[in-house]
Image (cartoon, rainbow, N blue to C red):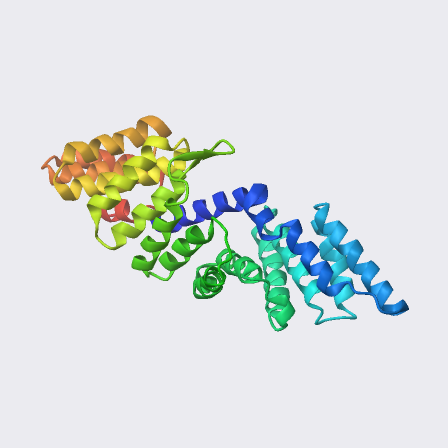
Amino acid sequence: MVDRHSRSAYGMYLHRKQTMHTVLVVVAVLLIIGLVGVFLIPWGTGDKKVGNEKNDLVQLWEAGSYDEAFRVSRELLQDRPLDPLLLTLHGFSAYQLAIAQINNFDTLTYIDACIWSLRKALLSKEGVLDGRIQYVLGKAYYYKGFGFADLAVKFLEEARRSSYQAQDIPEYLGLSYAALRDYRNSVASFTLALDPQDEVQSEGVAYPSDLLLLSIAQSYLALEERDTAYAYLQRCVDISKDSRTLVVARLLLGSILDKRGDRKGAEAQYMAILSEGGENAEAHYQLGELYAESGDPIRARAEWRKAYSIDPTHKPTRARLNV
């Protein structure tokens, strides 16, 4: 439950972050200019028309009119379904529209369009643009869901092997490897994500982020390297201002401290959740577990009853109360 929540939260964080800067790197104007040089050579009247249409499409893209670029490229693809420039811009536009959606169904609709278009673009040698297409494809498969994590890894690794530079490739690889339960590679990728600009501020956003630190800690926990996980969780708690992230991090810290035999430390983490973020069923349940381990069944049942009143569907609490 904790892993899935935090991965989802991190996906949302990356989703918002990409809208501001990283995706713009993917589809930099220099890329488009390079494509124009390859594909927009008019030889005759018909070719001039095609060139003008593509020029108009490029202008829409450069202006940030992704919805129009998506629509126009889709129409042009009806007559030229294997044109690599049209397929590339259609796929890139679809990705931009996908990450801007609020509704998950709409996001996945555009993600599918992105994948369909860019996979076809890869069939053309002109479409393999030094890792850019693979990079966007890898992220598109990540957003498509855990069941596509293997394809996310495949294309992101291809982008990295092609020497395409994008700061967030290690982050996406870390999350995708974690979804595959390949925690060694997950940790290795997350470590690379920390290297370039550890402990810096970029456009007012702390780097590494609290969610990146949380994701690294969870991979170390899966490897049963609790001391290392603890260090990353503590850093996460120190910098995070997000209540949901703090809840997940403190629950994990409490579990680690409990396994160390530090019940007072674990209790402090659960109490901090309740004081900072309000009532929380899992925190009350874990407090009940601590009190039960300490030989105080009355306080334990009181905490379990609080957990049940907050969330009657909480299965561990129901089992403890036999309800």
Is 60 left or right of 179, judged from the image as shown?
right
Residue 249 at what x, y percent from top left? Answer: 32, 39
Please tell me which residue is depicted at 33% across the width and 60% down the height of the picture.
181
Say if 257 sits above or below 224 in the image. above
Image location (x, y in percent) of residue 278: 36, 29
Query: Which residue appears farthest toward the right when viewing the image?
Result: 45
Q: Residue at x 44, y 48 (%)?
A: 8
In this rendering, does residue 35 appear at all?
A: yes
> Residue 88 falls in which quadrant of the image?
bottom right
Report which quarter residue 153 is drawn in: bottom left
Q: Residue furthest top?
A: 275
- In the displayed structure, 213 sits above or below 38; it is above
In this picture, residue 162 sits left or right of residue 53: left
The residue shown at (35%, 43%) is 214
Q: Position of residue 25 (x, y in %)?
A: 58, 48
Front in this rendered view, residue 117 or 207: 207
Q: Quadrant of residue 303?
A: top left
Q: Is residue 180 above or below residue 307?
A: below
Horizontal side of 193 relative to 38 (left or right) equals left
Q: Nearer the viewer, residue 158 or 316?
A: 158
Q: Is residue 284 left or right of residue 155?
A: left
Q: Looking at the image, which residue is at 41% across and 44% down?
A: 196
Say which of 290 and 143 sits in front: 143
Which x, y percent locates residue 240?
Answer: 38, 33
Q: Count of labels shown?
A: 0
